[in-house]
Image (spheres, coloured by chain):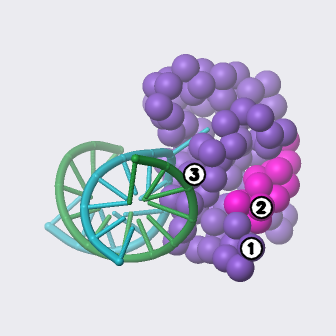
Chain colours: A purple, B cyan, C green
Amino acid sequence: MTTVSYQEIYSVVSCIPRGRVATYGQIARLAGIPGHARQVGYALSNLGDQVPIPWHRVVNARGMISSRADGCSMAVVQRLLLEDEGVTFDEHGRIPLSRFQWLPES
DNA sequence: CCACTGACGAGTG
DNA sequence: GCACTCGCCAGTG
């Protein structure tokens, strides 16, 4: 893989601790490709559900769950998974990143 | 090789 | 806080 393949993205995502969430841009940055947040989302979408990757801990910069082609079907699952890990949602259905965003060095 | 698409981000008004 | 625009790149037909 000459370029930063999905492997790096998967590695970073799988490193997200339980009860914490990370944004696409942050993952891209940790993967060594700042600004390529789109590629992160694309990589995860390509994963589907066949890989043991905590994709549910990945949200956009707004702290919301990005809808997939299925609509919001998986969004509900993602929310349940996060709540099960101790992550809470506000009235807007968003996660207070100020409190739950994963800090890779803390 | 060209065009379109897609889990996004940051900047501006 | 919200709406709009531009940028970035890989995969697919």
Residue A15 colored magenta?
yes
| Circles 2 and 1 in contact, beta carbons < 8 Å | yes
Pinpoint the chain carrying mark 1. Answer: A
| Circles 3 and 1 in contact, beta carbons < 8 Å | no
The answer for how far apart the CA atoms under marks 2 and 1 are is 9 Å
Q: Is residue A100 above or below residue A12?
A: above
Mark 3 = which residue?
A: A41
Mark 1 = which residue?
A: A1
Mark 2 = which residue?
A: A7
Instruction: Work out whether mark 2 precedes mark 1 in sequence or the reverse, and give the earlier one.
Output: 1
Which tag is nearer the camera, tag 2 or tag 3?
2
Point 71% across, 79% down: residue: A2
Disc 1 residue type? Met
Residue A93 location, x and y as percent?
51, 29
Disc 3 residue type? Gly
Our reading of the magenta stretch's main secondary structure is helix
Task: Decide if residue A103 is in sight here.
Answer: no
Instruction: Work out whether mark 2 precedes mark 3 in sequence or the reverse, and give the earlier one.
Output: 2
Q: Is residue A93 left or right of residue A33?
A: left
- Quadrant placement of the N terminus of chain A: bottom right
Which tag is nearer the camera, tag 3 or tag 1?
1
Instruction: Work out whether mark 3 precedes mark 1 in sequence or the reverse, and give the earlier one.
Output: 1
Q: Is residue B7 left or right of residue A22?
A: left
Q: Is residue A82 above or below residue C6?
A: above
The lab-note entry on whether marks 2 and 3 share a chain reads yes
Highlighted range, magenta: A6-18
Point 70% across, 60% down: residue: A6
Q: Nearer the viewer, residue C1 or C7?
A: C7
Point 47% across, 31% down: residue: A69
Residue A99 location, x and y as percent?
68, 48
Q: Residues within 10 Å of mark 2 (few under 14, many from 20)?
A: few
Q: Is residue C5 above or below residue A97?
A: below
